[in-house]
Image (tube, rainbow, N blue to C red):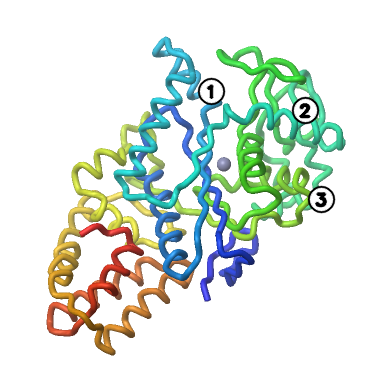
């Protein structure tokens, strides 16, 4: 039985999909820059999950939204005297290249938000018609007072929700209300709509992409833990209202941050580690072994030395690979089972790696493993020999 920690229940829940194909939505990048190791950790975590689900007999269908309608994209476009679309496509292509470099094979749908503006408009119209959204000075907001369960995902009371200052605009009814369409005149690029020229707001973009691709429900929603509020809270509210489904997402699965010197990586602090540079320097195998050595839910403090230290383990894996035979002996068979069981347990990759290292040591000192079983482990971890 596979268990996954569900942020919705705050528990390790049994994962009991009703269909063979597992639908997974991952919050994708805002396409105005290269991806850093924090992004790499997110996509490698869900890639590991998918590889493990595949090993356990499931198919996976992974959708990633590309946020190409965003002020950061517009700013970059303006600074380079380009159209937003040229900038967005450039970085979207870089992102796709990064996935290849990282040996991430699980992502099979990339959806560009700018292709969905018409759908977003229809969804917002429905929320207005249903009287769960309202106009305020040209902008459109979600009326969170109409969503009884609002706050359930981020575990916040009504009083706590009111403390956040977000999506500020004139005549907004409540602090916690979420913007759906922004008609500010300050954007360099805007889209026409029945609400006026403007841009569809972030949370509604993702809700629409997920609804149009997956319909009324899906299995797993993934992303960085910092997206829990307001992004995922509002996504859940909007999704319930638009799909008519109660709990339309079975599991909310959040990944911890990669910190640098105890701080969040940011260009302004000069502490960003780019995925491409790390893969060029160490290869994707070492980066995987390093990132998987920490449980996905924990924050990790980036330490380049520790990537280099994974060379020893990689060397052991290569030597063990040369010693594979036609049969797996009883002792190793048990360890292979344990390896998979560790991943069944909320994707406990640190434990799985320990077991794999033990397997390699035993093979080097005389135990036997079939090449199929050895390849199975490498396939699940995404290690290329
Ligand atoms: Zn998202």
- Tell me the number on the disc at residue 172: 2
Work out whether 245 lies above or below 144.
below
Residue at the image point whose x is 38% and y is 38% from the top? 96
Residue at the image point whose x is 36% and y is 33% from the top? 94
Label 3 crowding class (10 Å Cα cut-off): few <14, some 14-19, many 20+?
A: few
Lower position in the chain sequence, tag 3 or tag 2: 3
Mark 1, secondary structure of its residue: helix
User: Where residue 326 sits in the image (x, y, percent)?
Assistant: 21, 80
Calculate the distance from the C-alpha at mark 3 to the C-alpha at mark 2: 19 Å
Lower position in the chain sequence, tag 1 or tag 2: 1
User: Where residue 15 sits in the image (x, y, percent)?
Assistant: 58, 69
State ligand 1's quadrant: top right
User: Where residue 11 sits in the image (x, y, percent)?
Assistant: 59, 68
- Residue 101 placement, left or right of 229: left
Query: Which one is in front, 125 or 58?
Result: 58
Mark 1 lies on residue: 71
């Amino acid at each position: 039985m596979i268990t996954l920690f569900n942020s919705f229940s705050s528990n390790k829940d049994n994962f009991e999909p009703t269909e063979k194909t597992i639908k997974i939505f991952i919050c994708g990048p805002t396409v105005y820059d290269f991806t850093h190791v924090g992004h790499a950790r997110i996509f490698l975590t869900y890639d590991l999950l998918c590889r493990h689900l595949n090993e356990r007999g499931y198919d996976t269908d992974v959708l990633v939204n590309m946020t190409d309608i965003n002020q950061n994209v517009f700013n970059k476009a303006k600074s380079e005297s380009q159209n937003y679309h040229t900038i967005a496509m450039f970085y979207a292509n870089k992102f796709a290249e990064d996935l290849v470099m990282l040996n991430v094979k699980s992502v099979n749908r990339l959806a560009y938000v700018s292709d969905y503006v018409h759908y977003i408009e229809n969804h917002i119209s429905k929320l207005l018609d249903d009287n769960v959204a309202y106009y305020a000075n040209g902008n459109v907001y979600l009326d969170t007072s109409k969503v009884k369960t609002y706050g359930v995902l981020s575990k916040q009371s009504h009083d706590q929700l009111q403390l956040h200052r977000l999506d500020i605009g004139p005549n907004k009814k409540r602090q916690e209300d979420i913007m759906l369409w922004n008609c500010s005149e300050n954007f360099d690029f805007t889209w026409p709509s029945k609400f006026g020229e403007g841009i569809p707001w972030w949370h509604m973009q993702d809700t629409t992409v997920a609804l149009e691709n997956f319909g009324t429900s899906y299995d797993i929603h993934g992303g960085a833990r910092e997206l829990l509020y307001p992004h995922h809270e509002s996504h859940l509210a909007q999704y319930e209202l638009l799909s008519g489904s109660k709990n339309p997402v079975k599991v909310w699965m959040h990944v911890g941050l990669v910190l640098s010197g105890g701080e969040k990586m940011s260009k302004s602090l000069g502490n960003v580690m780019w995925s491409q540079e790390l893969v060029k320097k160490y290869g994707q195998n070492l980066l995987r072994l390093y990132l998987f050595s920490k449980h996905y839910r924990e924050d990790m403090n980036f330490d380049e030395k520790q990537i280099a230290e994974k060379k020893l383990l990689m060397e052991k894996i290569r030597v063990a690979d040369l010693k594979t035979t036609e049969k797996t002996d009883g002792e190793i068979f048990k360890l292979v089972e344990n390896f998979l069981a560790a991943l069944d347990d909320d994707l406990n990759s640190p434990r799985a790696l320990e077991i794999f290292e033990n397997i390699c040591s035993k093979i080097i000192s005389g135990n036997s493993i079939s090449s199929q079983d050895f390849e199975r482990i490498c396939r699940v971890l995404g290690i290329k020999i």
